[in-house]
Image: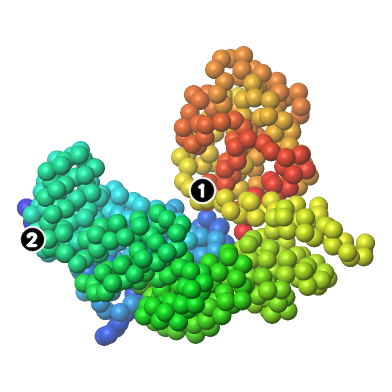
């Protein structure tokens, strides 16, 4: 029996690694065992030609240790040699698994179709305890890697958890809550596992809260009350108990515009919640006390000449909440037009944030599964926000020269020209200071590298500048379109749809893999669809599309033979040089997830959906510009 079980395990492990890791396709690994740590050579074979050999490639890897809630994230640059990319990763001996993603300098990804590439760590040929469970933990949705489009894989998570529990039964208690989330709630397996989970005597407050919410959702009043009472009795000073108990005071604060009443609610909150049971509770108290209450009350304290009292309360907060409370307090003053006092507190926030920018100590929100570069980006984004508030206070006082320096840092240095609000205020500051040529130069930079909108466009058109230097409004349109496209770029899977051509032959979507596909769904009864075909054909002709971009027009939602014949006539009579296919069973709306025509689905070289477009807007020129931008963004 034992040997049968072992054989079963090995078969499942092999199948799982083939399904998830796909080591044989794009990644291979070379292990070098050491005394205190090991290293693994990661060889990346770009079989789908996602990247160029001139690209700078990076491995983002998540290193899991046994019985930890989160992995640690790292970034390693690859070297290109022998027609493949290579990186060497140091793996400490207490690590149990790795999750890897490949990206280039423009953040183009190979994330193994949303699953990542994972690798269990073995010692002397034995899979480490926690190897399968730590990956399952991520697939079950317990944490989510930022920016890399890893999707929840509940079936894979369930299999991995079960592999783990078979090899190491003692690990079940730690991961049981997340294992439950992978099971069908209508199955007997779920019921028995839930019963086992409920029987634990050491359920923490998050597990008790989960059970309370679960039975509340099921309308099981008795069990909801049982687990809710147990939560409050076991953790009377815990995060959830404190949150519920403080709700009346929070409502008293937020439910009135009367500043005197708000201050009274704040003083009661401050007096009642001086102590806390755990760090989660402390952080919640500081969040409400500082960012929710004190930042909104600053104008009131200033009005009654109580700034010292306000600042004393702010200084009791940890830096995590002190800095934003100072900044958002200044923002409240800006909203009231009091830039003079706002300047003082915004400047404090900026100076503290600049000191924090390079520290190695992470706040709780700067999770371990963020790389150092991602943490740096988060901090720079916050600094840009605080600089914007500081610059706004100077702008309100018409201190344009000082505001120029501060807003330049906010918009250009730290927000990197990507924030419309910051860009716009900086531009307004330059115009108010009559620095028209500088405004012109800055606007051109925003157009090329950042974000612009119609309001910024209007600010620039009437500037008193010589005709030769006049602002090019038509050129700006392209950049407005680009920013709209970038905001809606996605990464989704799509099934391998099968259509028929005019000869009745089957053509699968997967046959276009390795190319950018513009999949245009249309019908002969849809006038905007027919107009859109002409635009697509002109786009093909004007851009002399290479063999790596293909426009596939799929006729769908025709309910009789006459409709199909009309579709054929339209394509033939207009001599369109477009691929014409038919969705005979009208399955496209369900498979490609659309509810209206015309719909265009833009698919990248790896077969993933990157953009959806429903309906047609704008002139033909604008439509052609939009198509060019979408294809250009997908090519990156």
Query: Can residue 362 be seen by looking at this rendering?
Result: no
Q: Above or below — where is 172 with respect to 502?
A: below
Q: Relative to 581, is 301 on the left or the right?
A: left
The residue beneath circle 2 is 201
SS assignment at label 2: loop
The percent position of residue 341, horizontal first and vertical second, equals 57, 76
Q: Above or below — where is 127 with respect to 227?
A: below
Q: Above or below — where is 47 with respect to 79?
A: above
Q: Quadrant of the C terminus?
A: bottom right
The percent position of residue 188, horizontal first and vertical second, equals 14, 40
Q: Above or below — where is 230 with respect to 304?
A: above
- How would you rate the neighbour count of disc 2 (Cα within 10 Å): few for under 14, some for 14-19, many for 20 or more? few
Query: Can residue 393 be seen by looking at this rendering?
Result: yes
- Between 322 and 32, the one nearer to me in the picture: 322
Residue found at x 26% / y 74%: 274
- Between 530 and 408, the one nearer to me in the picture: 408
Q: Relative to 572, is 72 on the left or the right?
A: left
Residue found at x 21% / y 40%: 218
The residue beneath circle 1 is 608
Number of numbered callouts drawn: 2
């Amino acid at each position: 029996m034992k040997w049968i079980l072992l054989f079963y395990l090995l078969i499942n492990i092999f199948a799982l690694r083939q399904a998830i890791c796909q080591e044989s396709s794009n990644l291979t690994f070379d292990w070098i065992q050491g005394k205190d740590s090991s290293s693994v050579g990661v060889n990346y074979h770009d079989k789908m030609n996602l990247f160029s050999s001139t690209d700078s490639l990076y491995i983002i890897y998540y290193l899991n240790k046994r019985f930890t809630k989160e992995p640690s994230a790292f970034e390693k640059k690859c070297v290109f040699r022998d027609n493949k990319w290579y990186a060497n990763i140091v793996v400490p001996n207490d690590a149990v698994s790795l999750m890897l993603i490949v990206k280039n300098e423009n953040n183009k990804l190979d994330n193994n179709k949303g699953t990542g590439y994972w690798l269990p760590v073995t010692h002397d040929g034995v899979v480490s305890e926690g190897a399968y469970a730590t990956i399952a933990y991520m697939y079950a949705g317990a944490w989510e890697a930022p920016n890399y489009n890893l999707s929840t894989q509940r079936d894979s998570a369930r299999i991995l958890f079960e592999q783990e529990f078979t090899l190491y039964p003692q690990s079940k208690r730690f991961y049981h809550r997340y294992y439950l989330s992978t099971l069908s709630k209508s199955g007997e397996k779920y019921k028995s596992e839930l019963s086992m989970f409920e029987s634990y005597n050491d359920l923490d407050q998050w597990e008790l809260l989960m059970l309370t919410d679960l039975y509340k959702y099921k309308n099981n009043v008795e069990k909801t009350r049982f687990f809710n009472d147990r939560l409050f009795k076991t953790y009377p000073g815990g995060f959830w108990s404190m949150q519920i108990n403080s709700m009346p005071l929070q409502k008293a604060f937020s439910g009135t515009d009367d500043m005197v009443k708000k201050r009274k609610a704040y003083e009661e909150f401050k007096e009642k919640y001086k102590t806390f049971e755990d760090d989660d509770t402390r952080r919640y108290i500081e969040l409400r006390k500082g960012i929710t209450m004190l930042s909104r009350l600053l104008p009131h304290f200033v009005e009654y000449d109580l700034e010292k009292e306000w600042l004393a309360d702010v200084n009791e907060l940890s830096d995590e909440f002190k800095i934003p409370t100072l900044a958002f307090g200044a923002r409240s003053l800006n909203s009231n037009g009091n830039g003079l006092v706002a300047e003082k507190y915004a400047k404090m926030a900026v100076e503290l944030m600049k000191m924090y920018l390079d520290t190695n100590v992470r706040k709780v929100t700067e999770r371990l599964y963020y790389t150092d570069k991602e943490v740096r980006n988060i901090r720079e984004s916050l600094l840009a926000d605080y600089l914007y508030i500081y610059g706004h206070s100077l702008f309100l006082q018409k201190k344009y020269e000082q505001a120029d320096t501060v807003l330049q840092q906010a918009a250009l240095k730290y927000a990197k020209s990507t924030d419309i609000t910051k860009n716009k205020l900086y531009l307004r500051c330059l115009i108010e200071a009559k620095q028209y040529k500088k405004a012109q130069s800055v606007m051109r930079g925003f157009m090329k590298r950042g974000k612009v909108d119609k309001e910024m466009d209007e600010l620039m058109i009437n500037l008193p500048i010589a005709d030769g230097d006049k602002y090019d409004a038509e050129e700006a349109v392209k950049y407005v379109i680009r920013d709209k496209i970038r905001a809606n770029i996605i990464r989704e899977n799509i099934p391998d749809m099968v259509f028929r051509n005019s000869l009745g032959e089957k053509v699968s979507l997967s046959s276009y893999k390795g190319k950018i596909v513009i999949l245009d769904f249309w019908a002969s009864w849809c006038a905007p669809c027919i107009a859109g075909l002409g635009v697509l054909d002109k786009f093909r002709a004007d851009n002399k599309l290479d063999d790596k971009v293909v426009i596939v027009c799929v006729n769908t939602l025709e309910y009789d033979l006459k409709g199909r014949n009309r579709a054929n006539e339209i394509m033939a009579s207009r001599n369109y040089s477009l691929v014409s296919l038919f969705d005979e069973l009208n399955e496209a709306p369900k498979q490609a997830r659309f509810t209206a025509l015309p719909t265009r689905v833009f698919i990248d070289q790896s077969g993933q959906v990157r953009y959806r477009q429903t309906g047609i807007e704008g002139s033909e020129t604008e439509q052609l510009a939009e198509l060019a931008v979408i294809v250009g963004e997908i090519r990156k």
